[in-house]
Amino acid sequence: MPAQAQDSVAAFGYEWSRLRIVESRLSLYRKVFASRGVWFDYYDDKVVADVGSGNGRFAWALAAMTKAREILSIELSTDAVEHQRRTLTDSRIRIIQGDAARVKFKADVIYAAGFIQHTMDPRATIANLVDNLNDGGELLCSFYMRSLASTALRPLRWVLSRLTMDLLWALTPLLAPLFMVHREGREGGFQNARHTAFDWLAGHGYQHYFTEATIREACLSASIDEHNILRVSEGLYRIRKGAFPLILDAERIFF
């Protein structure tokens, strides 16, 4: 498939190499563990890939908070990769520069947070990620869901995406409150809300929104059994590669 649009790659390189983001161990635990519906020891002794890893904060969290055997930090932007190479020092982390729709590796778990919607072809990206999983492995994936808010913000994004990245970032203090309405946004704090505003409104090449039906269709097209698609919460899914061993039918059983 064609390469990702360079304006999208450049926007993320700008965001993750030049702009600071603030996290705590508590907020990282919520994002890497609790919100994904997994226990504290879920990643232990596994090869874990953080795909679309940006500035590397989730790869850092996996190294600091788990006993993962190896952590693959996979990112396309050259600027973001160089930033990671300066800041990630754990010997278990291997940084790979590559396009999520093309890159080849093998992992037991793929952590994919907040990037599928910014790829040229999300369905092809999901198919490649599934192909990179070991049998029985899981893809922990988040999606931007189609909503009234996403529709309402589309004209604003169309206008703001024409601005330079410096100017748009300067405007994010005015836009951040839009992304602090929900509890997760408030818990993340104002600085992270600025990043969310930049993510939603910057000149990325692509911004896809999903429904539960389109997520299911993408998984089925990647040969995922329908019973191996688990919705954890709104926009957050656990997707397992491999056969589903049970025979399920609608025959009534009386007890």
Image (cartoon, rainbow, N blue to C red):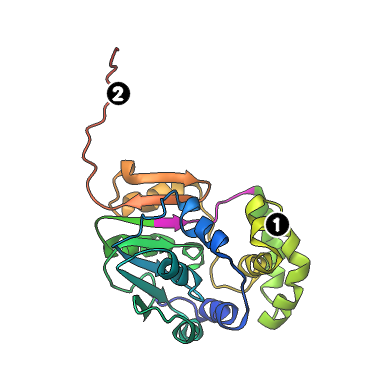
Residue 21 x/y as whole percent: 61, 73
How far is mark 1 from mark 2, CA to CA?
44 Å
Mark 1 vs mark 2, foreground winner is 1
Relative to 79, residue 175 above or below: above
- Judged from the image, the secondary structure of the residue bearing numbered disc 2 is loop
Q: Residue at x 53, y 60 (%)?
A: 208
Q: Nearer the viewer, residue 76 or 101?
A: 76
158 drawn magenta: no
Q: Position of residue 191 (x, y in %)?
A: 68, 69
150 or 106, nearer to the observer: 106
Magenta range is 140-147
* Residue at numbered disc 1: 180
Give coordinates of residue 75: x percent, y percent.
43, 76
Residue 164, image quadrant: bottom right
Q: Callout 1: helix, strand or loop?
A: loop
Q: Which mark is residue 250?
A: 2
